[in-house]
Image (spheres, rainbow, N blue to C red):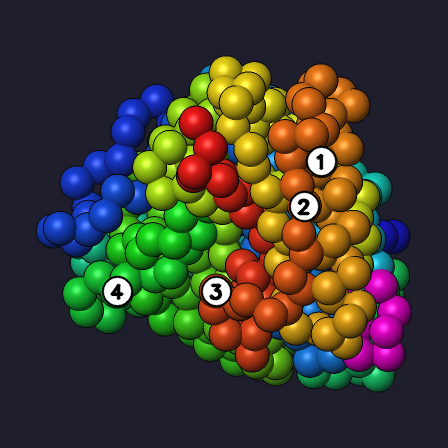
């Protein structure tokens, strides 16, 4: 059975907007409801591997949401695993459930009634804020003895589901700012830090869990010790939730005012210049802007993290922006003479490359306008 462990994080298509659970003076946060096609990027730092995942809304109905999850794992021995899952989450569970499902399988439908998959429920959030603690359960996979201490997504078919039972506790501390790349903009959102204490099979598991401080959808932002016996860290690093019209407007404003914008929603396969289909919405928006401003001369700048050699990263960044230019010219008819490309590799990081989340945010495409051109 092909199984992956870890919380596939998401935002719910709720009927209401964000509740007033915000830090006073906080910058605007995550936008609810999310449109179809919105994506969330998460990273998972493991014992001998790193994972990056893109979770995209495929369908939403009054009963819940259908997601696709595309992941890439890079192991210390240089092995790379790529996989796609589909799963769903029921609106009734987002309201009331007190259990979390922490893995997925390619052999089932991805539906697990009675569980949330990407957040704690609204009911549990309110109970934690009111009483400080409440009972909670997490369904995890347990690895065989020979893989003790290794996250179960490495262990393979012999892993078995285990239900962990215990308590979640809100330390009653003030909300903490949590860094997030939202639609290409670096912001901070308010987060609660929860402590979990769970038991199963005579063992104790005590994760630290950060959730979005919002009762509409308490998204899990980070899990420290995301599996019993390990120090792996699961984290949400990026959300691209704007609709195509909003993305176009943001790109246009950025190019008009500051002559530079970091493009949201551009995704590539690992160590590759192959564009993911999830990039199409952003590329459509960029093409619309460039068609309205046919006199603009722009440069696509490619940036990578620091993994690999300086020369290899520079070549990869050049190939990636060349692929973006090719898509804009071939599919959308943008004049190739108006678009230059430049690859900078790892030479211009925005965040430290020493963390998996910093590396994820450093992999980006920026669009720059020649501001002297009218």
| Residue 325, label in figure | 1
Task: Name the front one of labels 3 and 1.
Answer: 1
Question: What's the CA distance linking mark 3 and mark 2?
Answer: 19 Å
For the record, the magenta segment spans 72-80
Lower position in the chain sequence, tag 2 or tag 4? 4
Query: Residue 282, relative to residue 125: is it above or below?
Result: above
Percent from the top left, x then y, of residue 265? Answer: 57, 39
| Residue 11, label in figure | none
Q: Are dots 4 and 1 in contact, CB under 8 Å?
A: no
Q: Going by the image, does 126 lie left or right of 312? A: left
Lower position in the chain sequence, tag 4 or tag 1? 4
Q: Are dots 4 and 3 in contact, CB under 8 Å?
A: no
* Residue at mark 3: 350
Within-10-Å neighbours for mark 3: few <14, some 14–19, many 20+? some
Task: Name the front one of labels 2 and 4.
Answer: 2
Task: Name the front one of labels 4 and 3.
Answer: 3
Lower position in the chain sequence, tag 3 or tag 1? 1
Task: Name the front one of labels 3 and 2.
Answer: 2
Lower position in the chain sequence, tag 3 or tag 2? 2
Question: SS of the residue at dot 2?
Answer: strand
> Which of the pair 41/101 is nearer the observer?
41
Within-10-Å neighbours for mark 2: few <14, some 14–19, many 20+? many
Question: What's the CA distance linking mark 4 and mark 1?
Answer: 40 Å
Question: What's the CA distance linking mark 4 and mark 3?
Answer: 22 Å
């Amino acid at each position: 059975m092909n199984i992956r462990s870890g919380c596939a994080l998401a935002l719910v298509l709720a009927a209401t907007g964000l509740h007033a659970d915000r830090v006073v003076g906080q910058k605007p946060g995550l936008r609810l409801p999310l449109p179809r096609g919105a994506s969330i990027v998460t990273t998972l730092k493991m014992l001998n591997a790193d994972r990056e995942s893109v979770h995209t809304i495929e369908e939403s109905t009054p009963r819940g949401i259908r997601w696709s999850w595309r992941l890439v794992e890079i192991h210390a021995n240089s092995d790379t695993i790529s996989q796609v899952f589909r799963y769903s989450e029921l609106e009734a569970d987002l309201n009331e459930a007190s259990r979390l499902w922490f893995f997925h399988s390619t052999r089932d439908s991805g539906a697990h009634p009675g569980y949330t998959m990407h957040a704690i429920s609204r009911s549990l959030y309110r109970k934690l804020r009111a009483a400080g603690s409440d009972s909670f359960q997490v369904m995890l996979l347990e690895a065989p003895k020979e893989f003790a201490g290794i996250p179960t997504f490495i262990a393979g078919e012999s892993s078995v589901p285990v239900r962990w039972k215990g308590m979640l506790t809100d330390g009653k501390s003030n909300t903490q700012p949590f860094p997030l790349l939202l639609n290409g903009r670096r912001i901070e959102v308010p987060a609660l830090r929860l402590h979990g204490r769970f038991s199963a099979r005579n063992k104790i598991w005590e994760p630290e869990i950060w959730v979005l401080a919002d009762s509409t959808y308490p998204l899990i932002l980070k899990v420290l010790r995301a599996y019993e016996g390990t120090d792996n860290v699961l984290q949400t690093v990026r959300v691209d939730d704007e609709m195509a019209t909003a993305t176009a407007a943001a790109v246009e404003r950025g190019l008009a005012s500051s002559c530079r914008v970091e493009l949201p929603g551009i995704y590539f396969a690992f160590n590759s210049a192959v564009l993911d289909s999830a990039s199409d919405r952003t590329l459509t928006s960029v093409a619309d802007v460039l068609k309205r401003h046919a006199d603009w001369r722009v440069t696509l700048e490619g940036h990578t993290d620091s993994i690999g050699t300086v020369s290899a990263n520079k070549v990869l960044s050049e190939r990636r922006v060349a692929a973006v230019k090719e898509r804009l010219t071939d599919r959308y008819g943008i004049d190739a003479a108006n678009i230059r490309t430049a690859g900078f590799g790892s030479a211009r990081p925005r965040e430290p490359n020493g963390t998996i989340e910093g590396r994820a945010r450093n992999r980006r495409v920026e669009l720059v306008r020649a501001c002297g051109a009218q």
